[in-house]
Image (cartoon, coloured by chain):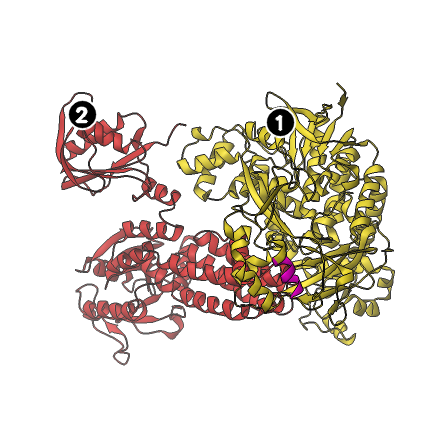
Chain colours: A red, B yellow
Amino acid sequence: MRGKDTIFALSSGALPAGIAVVRSSGPASGALVAALAGRVPQARLAELATLRDPATGEEIDRGLLLFFPGPASVTGEDVAEFHLHGGRAVVARLLAVLSSVAGCRMAEAGEFTRRAFDNGKLDLTEAEGLADLIDSETEGQRKQALRQMSGALRLRAEGWRAGVLEAMALIAADLDFSDEDDVGEKAAVGVRAVIMAVLGDVEEALSSSRIGERIRDGVRVVIAGAPNVGKSSLLNRLAGRDVAIVSRIAGTTRDAIEVRLDIGGVPVDLVDTAGIREAGDEIEAEGIRRSRARMEDADLVLHVIDATAERDAAAAVDVGSGPVLLVRNKIDLGEVAPGVREGFGISAATGEGLDQVIAALGRFVSETYGTREGGVVTRERQRRLVGDLAVALRAALGRLDDMPELAAEELRRAAQAIGRLTGTIDVEEMLGTIFGRFCIGK
Amino acid sequence: MQEDRFDVIVVGGGHAGCEAAAAAARVGARTALVTHRFATIGEMSCNPAIGGLGKGHLVREVDALDGLMGRVADAAGIQFRILNRRKGPAVQGPRAQADRKLYRQAMQAAILATPGLEVVEGDAADLLLSANRVGGVTIANGRVLRAGAVVLTTGTFLRGVIHIGDRQIPAGRVGEAPSIGLSATLERAGLRLGRLKTGTPPRLDGKTIDWAGLDVQKGDDPPVPFSMLTRAITTPQIVCHITRTTAAGHDLIRTNLARAPIYSGQIGSRGPRYCPSIEDKVVRFADRDSHQVFLEPEGLDDDTVYPNGISTSLPEDVQEGLVRAMPGLEKVRILRPGYAIEYDHVDPTELYPSLETKKLAGLFLAGQINGTTGYEEAAAQGLVAGVNAARLAGGGDAVEFDRTTSYLGVMIDDLVTKGISEPYRMFTSRAEFRLSLRTDNADIRLTPVGDRLGCVRSERRAHFDSRSKRIDMARELLRSLRMSPSEAARRGLSVNQDGVVRSGFDLLGYADIGFDDLRRVWPELGTIDEDAATFVATEARYAVYLDRQASDAEALKRDEDLRLPVDLDYAAIGGLSNEVRGKLASARPVSIGHAARIDGITPAALTALLAHVRKRPDRFGSEADGR
């Protein structure tokens, strides 16, 4: 039978660099090493070797070699690592030589992880954690992704899985073995407690999902206010400050401009919105509609007002129902409403008062998201499934007394949700639980 | 040398063989049923009972396809009970104690009455093979029978060995020789064989039992028959008695464990976990000093009693000590000792869902040879194998029964996709569409299918037409009658006062509103008979769930409709791990849905398969039947 391709790729960062690591995975990994170095090093021990082009015998580089035989490797397949000097030409030459070997090709994006997943080295949530770890930009993201990759959600889900399996088994015993003297009513006792325990833990995980998703996807801070109060200037000022800017995402001027900041390890997306007022034309109306939508979605609104303008109650803008920081801009031009001194007085033009705004943002972020080590549920996909799980468990509790077959049906749905999250629950496994627990067989 | 030609040959006269032969004949095949002796056709080798939880569903499905088991059990039943009567309709299962002699007689009569079915007495010694195609069987006396398809239902006969203590007796059943040659032929053809174990308790002489003082278990009154065609049970009904094992008996077992074949190492094969021997129970559940034992009479004019719950292969002296330690059995005489039996089975992943083997064209297997246990499981497979054998012999496509519409589909799918590690028994928990697969709608689900296949006779068809019409009318009438919440409250029906107008069908979905309540409100419902009323009330009660299951079933169906060619070169499909390739190559799934249920097949692998299949939609699009 023809085997699978052996894939390879540069696994370390951008070149040039002090060192470059090229990794291969697949059945030909051992042969590759042998072809280039003349031998296969002892498993999992680094060896110094001269790498040569097998076609010409020409030396490519001198470096470290590592060989990890499957299945005890990161992908579950035979894996080889070539540690080279990180010059562009060196790496290019090695990749070219590897490509020329039959059955070997460049890996596609994510293919190493995919193979690890296919070979059962990771479950879905761990694969997601690994992807997040590679993409992580802030310390908080790194910690959370690492926890996820190490199986934080998998372990939780395994606990839920065990509980749901137990409850399913007890109900199944009651339904399928009710005529057995050892089972009957006894099985039904205890099901409620088992389901309640799982539900409690599921709800706890779900309550952390907002934190988890924010750390992964960024806390959304929306700058809102009437036109010409200096929202864009404020954004540019904050972006130009010596805070770690992560990325800039340009939108249309009518829409929004976003800047990602790293505040205390938590990614914060600062979003400028179109000025909110009565729509002058259709395009503006669309911009405003989006602004409102963004505000509803915001974790915090920076409400910017013009310190030099009269505060007109009739022109007050709607800033949504969430937390709001009031910012009075243009204080360098003098404040016309000396009676109103709430919020922060700043000047986007001179930079005055900005430190206080950043400090307030930092307090908000650390109070809301920094107190825990991130969430267990970090993605919308996970939240949806864990949510489905909670709904099914509650419905099962409601059906337990009058219609156990419907409770069983709800538990089956709960099991499906867990299965989609990580793996599957098998009927045989459930029956195994029954036979282990009850003496069945007339 | 005598030579005969048939369309279908069925080997074995047990529960699988009888249904297979009768089904093949109903479909129109000229059929031979080969069995050692006509007199043992329909023998109940183990417990004298039919049906139960999950199993009762199978009997109703066999009946819906006009099979024999339901009608025969109705004729032979001496105690009928609906199990789980206090639970929902989807999980209720009909069960009956049967008079073994009446059962045999009724089954033999049914076989004789089947047109186109001939019984051939003899020992099927071997298969006629040419180039991996089965063309018939040879009988030990030299007779050769040829046919377009052969169904093997060998039960426990393939290399059967009975164990009683340290005694080992080659046998298919007590007093009957095992079949050795067929196993060797199957093995030579490359079919993977395995070995399983099952057991049976000693039989007791009822005349030596002291019945006074034992608990009594009564049947339902009136008894509910299995078959839609049975109007009433006319066989006299009896009661069963209940006794218990005792600490003294358990001690005796513990002292003699070394003499028990399953602990001495004499038996290595797996037995069913849900039907453990008494020695197994005593060891595994050491904290219990007593187990319930049902004393089931084997017949109206037969003093033999079947003690349900103490299957054993302990030596005879220990068996006697064990039973005599039970209340009421102090002076009991054992008529025949209990025993364990080991036998060969074929790995059921060797089969297509039609129950034809993948390696030998024209060879179908049904019953214990496929690793199942139980009369009902055997009968259901027999019916499917019989119909498919007849279709193959007649040049037709194979038919498959799927998980969404029948328990027999669930069973066959489990067998052919997952294989077995212990004798497979039906449970309602195995059916994910349990709420839709009920005993009350087996005919609605399957009789039209059977009609299309030609295995349903006119009497059944007529009964079905009338019943389904009555049910449809009841449903329509209930949906047409509507009532506001305030009106409902005035009539004494408690519903949410939310202004939503509800139909009679909606109202029936409420746990505390019954059909009689609605009859009070709407006198026109008086035209609906009890059967239709109960049926529609069940549908109403499960309505929300049935809708959900229907959409799940559709999703499953879509996967089933994505057919995979059986000769697919899995090595040529990119993106599969070697392990997955190996599993798929050995299982040869017939559809994406089938592949998804194979253990260890990841979503990623399915995506790769799907991508591959989609590339060739012209060849493998949406052919629903056939392969």
Give the dominant element type of the magenta stretch: helix, strand or loop: helix
Residue most extreme to the bottom: A339
Q: Nearer the viewer, residue B300 or B519?
A: B300
Query: Which residue is painted at 26% across and 52% down in the image?
Result: A248
Q: Is residue B490 left or right of residue A166?
A: right
Q: Position of residue B203 (x, y in %)?
A: 71, 55
Q: Is residue B18 above or below residue A238?
A: above
Residue B259: percent from left, percent from top: 54, 54
Q: Residue at x 17, y 41 (%)?
A: A46
From the image, tell me which residue sits under label 2.
Answer: A53
Along the viewing direction, whichever of B344 and B575 lies nearer the viewer:
B344
Q: How many numbered marks, from 0 up?
A: 2
Numbered mark located on residue A76 in the image: none
Reply yes or no: does residue B321 show up in magenta: yes
Q: Amino acid at mark 1?
A: Ala
Q: Is residue B256 magenta?
A: no
Q: Nearer the viewer, residue A176 or B600?
A: A176
Q: Horizontal placement of A302 versus B494: left or right? A: left
Which range is magenta? Answer: B318-325
Asked if disc 2 and disc 1 are in contact, CB closer than 8 Å, the reply is no
Q: Position of residue B513 (x, y in %)?
A: 74, 69
